Amino acid sequence: MKTISIIVPCYNEEAALPLYYEAMKPVVKELEQLGARSEFVFVDDGSADGTLTVIKALAARDASCKYISFSRNFGKEAAMYAGLQNAGGDYVAVMDADLQDPPEMLPEMFKIIENSKAGGEMGSKGEEIDCVGTRRTNRKGEPPVRSLFARLFYKLINKISKTEIVDGARDYRLMTRRMTDAILQMSEYNRFSKGIFSWVGFKTHWLEYVNRERAAGETKWSFFKLLLYSFDGIVAFSTAPLSIASAVGFLSCLGSGLYMLYVFIKALAFGDPVAGWPSLVCIILFLGGVQLLGIGVLGQYLAKTYLEVKQRPIYIAKEKNF
Ligand code: UDP
Ligand code: MG
């Protein structure tokens, strides 16, 4: 019998967790019929509410519930990493606690991977599937401004990064052991999972579903947090902003050289007195701005390098039950 580890990052999910657990019961049964035993790895990401109490109660009743609790809030990326490290299964799933990731898709995901391994329909092109990911087909229930920026972000990052970041892809996925091990080898501090999942390669099959609203509780992501997260993603998976800064510097050098030539010739040949402090102010401000922007971009990469070099642990666990 195969084992599936289901990683559930939880931050202030006391309201959603009992609903999640109930909704997973039939799924666990169905997976059992398909030949897979499930274990849960709940990661309490330093919740300030009764999340840990709820998890402990679940673990007391159900031996297949493992949990690990952080000393403070480290973020979902860190929670997922902790889950991956502590998942012992042949297959590993990542799933939100708020039921926005449809539980009933999990058996289907399992079937697709198994089927490809058996040389079935999906894997018949000679390739085994190592991951079944999910994408939302719409962004219903989301503020329009957020959707707009999200779309822009995916367009931009896919232009400037070699790693493909799939628009609408969720973290909800099922992976094989070998893919999980590959991800664990990427022990970087600044984690951007959407990129990491894709960077490690392996064949991913995408399932689509219509966006769902949260079952209970509220989202942990403000618009500003998402914006910062998108910058993290760009810095983590592309160095294009650095090249752009160089390119802009080169172009403005070229432009100013040509302009200088023009001014010289005009003054020598036509004796035209050069008037123009407004244009001077514009040029100084423009170049000053470009320089500051360039330094800022450089600073972003330097800051990330600084954090990476310090080699701080990605999370600190306070307690666990295994
Ligand atoms: N989460 C976490 N740590 C955080 C923020 C969120 O572990 O700092 C978990 C949260 O409990 C949930 C999942 O990550 O299970 C997704 O969070 P949320 O539903 O708030 O994000 P959204 O679905 O709105 O993108
Ligand atoms: Mg959610």
Image (cartoon, rainbow, N blue to C red):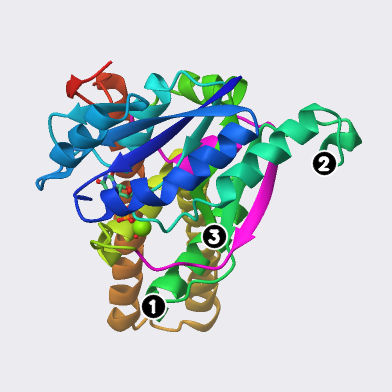
Q: Nearer the viewer, residue 185 or 63?
A: 63
Residue name at image x 28 percent, y 80 percent: 277
Frontmost of labels 1 and 3 is: 3
Q: Secondary structure at mark 1?
A: helix
For the question of whether residue 4 can be seen, the reply is yes
Q: Sequence-wise, which precedes: disc 1 or disc 3?
A: 1
Q: Quadrant of residue 278?
A: bottom left
The span from disc 3 to disc 2 (Cα, nearest Å) is: 23 Å
Relative placement, left or right, of 22 versus 55 is right
As for residue 161 lying within the magenta part, the answer is no
As for residue 203 lying within the magenta part, the answer is yes
Q: Secondary structure at mark 3?
A: loop
Q: Nearer the viewer, residue 201 or 289?
A: 201
Percent from the top left, x then y, of residue 33? 62, 35
Relative placement, left or right, of 33 versus 250 is right
Relative placement, left or right, of 25 versus 104 is left
Above or below, 272 relative to 88: below
Q: Sequence-wise, which precedes: disc 1 or disc 2?
A: 2
Of the numbered discs in the image, which one, if any, rests on residue 168?
3
Q: Nearer the viewer, residue 98 or 291?
A: 98
Q: Amino acid at mark 1?
A: Val
Look at the image and give the residue range highlighted in magenta.
189-214
Relative placement, left or right, of 201 versus 87 is right
Of the numbered discs in the image, which one, if any, rests on residue 119?
none
Percent from the top left, x then y, of residue 36? 58, 28
Neighbourhood count class around disc 1 (C-alpha, 10 Å): few under 14, some 14–19, many 20 upward = few
Q: Amino acid at mark 3?
A: Gly
- The residue labelled by disc 2 is 122
Query: Ligand 2 quadrant?
Result: bottom left
For the question of whether residue 46 can be seen, the reply is no
